[in-house]
Image (spheres, rainbow, N blue to C red):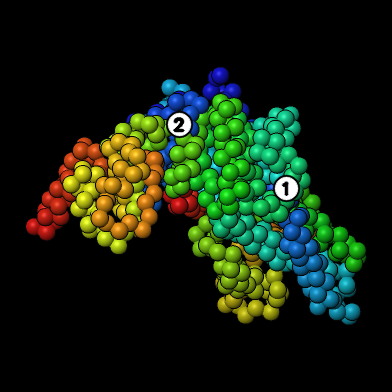
Amino acid sequence: MLQIRNLCKSYGPNPVLQNLNLSIAAGEIYGLLGSNGAGKTTTINILCHLLQTDSGSITLYDQPHSEATQSLIALVPQENLLYGSLTCEENLSFFARLYGLSKRQRQERIPACLKAVGLANRLKSPAETLSGGMQRRLSMAIALVHHPKLLILDEPTAGLDIDARTAMWRLIRQLQAQGMTILLTTHLLDEAERLCDRLGILKHGRLLAEGSLPQLRQRIAAQEIIVIKTAEEESAIARAQTLGFPHRRYGEDLAFWLPEVMELKDIIGCFAGILLTSIAREPVRLEHIYHEILRNPPVAERQADHLCTNSSTLSQLGRGLG
Amino acid sequence: MSSLAQSKKRLLRDWQGAIAIAQRILLELWRRQVSLVCWMIFPASILMVNGLILAKPSEVSTAAAFSQSVPPCLVGTALFFSCLGGSIATLVAEREQRTLKRLLVSSLRGTTYFLGVFLAYALIGLGQTLLIYALAAAAGAEFQGSMGICLLIIVLSIMVYVGTGFCIGATLARRTEDVNALVAALGVPLLLLSGALVPIEFFPDTLRQIARFNPIYHMIEALFEISVQGESFAEMASHLWVLVILAGVMPAAGWLAYRQMLISERSR
């Protein structure tokens, strides 16, 4: 449905997107992950025609992405960009008119969109009187009003409480069930894990890895992860090395990768003689994969970085000589 | 679909978009009420005070004083604060609330947005026109000249103010608090120098010469000469030409400034 090929974008001398390639199939939820500055927002802004590309191509349903295909895309921005004094109905009506919907189409779409996001009973409520979660859902309804095919959700649950977040997840799944294609960005890896059919991990404007969660899981040579708490961390790491268990730190946690699922007594036996305060078993989650991919990018990426470093060093050297 | 049909469809959509923007601005003002009420109180009070200042039982009747007060009160002060101040405030609010980004995603054209803001403030300006003329008529004021030319002067003045508002709103005013400061710093000296607050007859010669470079002076003089002094079109044509040129230049400059602002807003 959406294909991005060799997309490049720089802000002055700083490259933000470097030969970005990704494709999204109709009806899937694609999660674009990456730390701040990785290029997610730039990608979204280019898709929404807010920014021009330096090079590369975008096609939607095999047509070059242009003003004509712009109405196939809708964006739900991170902030609730609403007109507070206008009612839900008026907010939707305003944007529907900007998209050129006739009065008849508006009469049909506005109640349908508000119903879809669970705000059917708030038709006449001013947007500023809604809770944060409701405002986000209204923002979603505005995005849906002109019947887009691709919905872009920029951190859809940022700043929402757990109930509002759960409601938003439910809504996103409902939209997918109705055939909507969704591209979402998020910093919440559990959210991405729950919602996304496929994921792409961006760093410095390059896609380091892409695939479904089971596909990405293959990048970690572990069947299970254990997190231990002990005062004798050095001893634990040394013991794990002798057993061939790689170790990682996830924040404060000291974790070991187990190449196969083991019985608890066997795991404890591995660390015999070391005083363990606690031991927790975890399945391999997106969080582990994400950290691993950012820590050890694929070889091609490392080479590209190496080349970039060399070329910038050479250009700096050139400037120095000049 | 032929390119002609596509252009027609696009034009229709742009027009619908402009109407939607104008309606939204007016609806927001209606809901908040304060601005609309003030934009009614302000010209009414300025007209009353001006009329009472100018009225001298032995020389100028109350009716004549009120008819003389209408041009500086309407195209000088009322439209200045509503159309110029209002369009700056709309643009700044849209930037501050970041709703502009959402408008851009909907592939709204800059010209459509400009037209929408112009329509909204033109309606407010025309409302103020009706109010001022009604109050003046109630005080016995009589007017001369062509109503069509008077209306043309008012519409051209609104275009100049909204265009200037876009220039300032897109370049200098970044926050709501900037709006008051800019309108006070740039506007009040211009108003004083136009004869809107103090009749130009009181000005020394040097200031009178400088006033000729002030667009507001030409707005007031054009309306004054045709509606109060009953001069012919030819006699006041010099003021009207200045207005026509400014009504072309200021919206164009405002549109360019707005386009530049969009470029920076898009990458935010």
Secondary structure state at the residue bearing disc 1: loop
Task: Kindly indicate whether the residue at mark 2 contacts the one at mark 1 (C-beta within 8 angstroms).
Answer: no
Q: What's under tag 2, amino acid-wise?
A: Asp
The residue lying at 58 percent from left, 52 percent from top is A161
* Residue A289: percent from left, percent from top: 34, 41
> Residue B161, can we see it?
no
Is A55 positioned to the left or the right of B176 in the image?
A: left
* Residue B64: percent from left, percent from top: 85, 69
Q: What's under tag 1, amino acid-wise?
A: Thr
Is B193 positioned to the left or the right of B105 in the image?
A: right
The tag on residue A87 is 1
The tag on residue B119 is none
Of discs 1 and 2, which sits in the foreground?
2
The residue lying at 88 percent from left, 72 percent from top is B62
Q: Quadrant of the C terminus of chain A?
A: bottom left
Q: Is residue B118 above or below residue A284?
A: below
Specify few, some or many for label 1: CA neighbours under 10 Å numbering under 14, 14-19, or 20 or more: many
The residue lying at 55 percent from left, 42 percent from top is A76
| Residue at image mark 2 | A197
What chain letter is assigned to the residue under label 2?
A: A
In the image, are marks 1 and 2 on the same chain? yes
Precedes in sequence: disc 1 or disc 2: 1
Return the residue found at the far left: A321
Is A72 positioned to the left or the right of A99 in the image?
A: left
Quick one: B11 or A304, which is closer to the camera? A304
The residue lying at 52 percent from left, 62 percent from top is B174
> Residue B66, can we see it?
yes
* Residue A159: percent from left, percent from top: 54, 53
Q: Quadrant of the N terminus of chain A?
A: top left
